Image (cartoon, grey):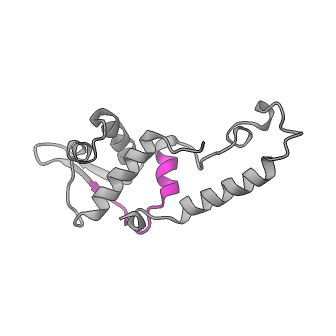
Amino acid sequence: MFQLSKKVEYGLIALRHIAAGSRGQIFTAKEIADKYQIPFELLAKVMQKLCKKGFVVSYQGVHGGYILVRDAHEVKVSAIINAIEEKPSVSIIQCESEKPESCIIHTTCTIKDPLVKLQSSINKVFEELSIMEMV
C-alpha cells in the first residue's frame, strides 16, 4: 500500500500548524509534538531538515521556535516530500522508485503502465496542493 513516511506526515502536520497561526508567530517543536502526540525527537529532526531547506527559520533561546518563511499558499506538498525524503516524488511501484533493472518482471509486467499513470496523477496532486489548502 502506498503510504507517506511518518517523517513526511509529521512535517506536514507541523507546517500546517504553523501556517494556521498568525503570520510571524513562533511555534516550538515541543508544543507541536505535544499537541498532536508526535514523538518530539523525530519532529525536531524533521524541523531541522525543513530549516536547512529554507521552509522555516528557527530561533534559539527561551522564546525560540520556528516560523514559516515562505508563503503557505506557495509551499507545495511535493516540495515538503522532496525536502524531507530527498526524492522529487513518491513511488507506488518498485520499478519507478528504483532502476527498472531492479524489477525481475520489468519487461513482461502488464500493470506497470497503468500504475505509472496513477503515480503521475498522485504526484500531480502533491505538486498542486499547498500547505494553506490543508489548513
Q: For the view shown, which residue lies furthest in the right direction?
A: 108
Q: On the image, which quarter does residue 26 sit in?
A: bottom left
User: In the figure, 102 relative to 3: above or below?
Assistant: above
Please state, as top left, top right, bottom left or bottom right, where the N terminus lies in the image. top right
- Residue 71 versus residue 38 in the image, above or below: below
State the image coordinates of residue 51 (x, y, percent, origin top left): 35, 47
Quadrant where the image shows the C terminus = bottom left
What is the quadrant of residue 29 in the picture?
A: top left
Asked whether, in this view, residue 131 is left or right of residue 82, the answer is left
Residue 75 on the magenta span: yes
Image position of 128 (left or right of 6): right
Q: Is residue 68 visible?
A: no
Q: Residue furthest front?
A: 1
The count of marks equals 0
Q: Which residues are magenta?
A: 67-83
- Residue 99, given in percent of the width and then of the height, sits at 74, 36
For image coordinates 20% across by 46% down, the residue present is 31
State the residue at coordinates (38%, 65%).
72
Q: Quadrant of residue 60?
A: top left
Give the camera-side residue of 65 and 122: 122
Q: Is residue 74 visible?
A: yes
Q: Residue at x 30, y 33 (%)?
A: 41
Q: Position of residue 56 (x, y in %)?
A: 33, 53
Q: Is residue 103 left or right of residue 80?
A: right
- Residue 12 appears at what percent x and percent y? 40, 52
Q: From the viewer's perspective, is 106 left or right of 6? A: right
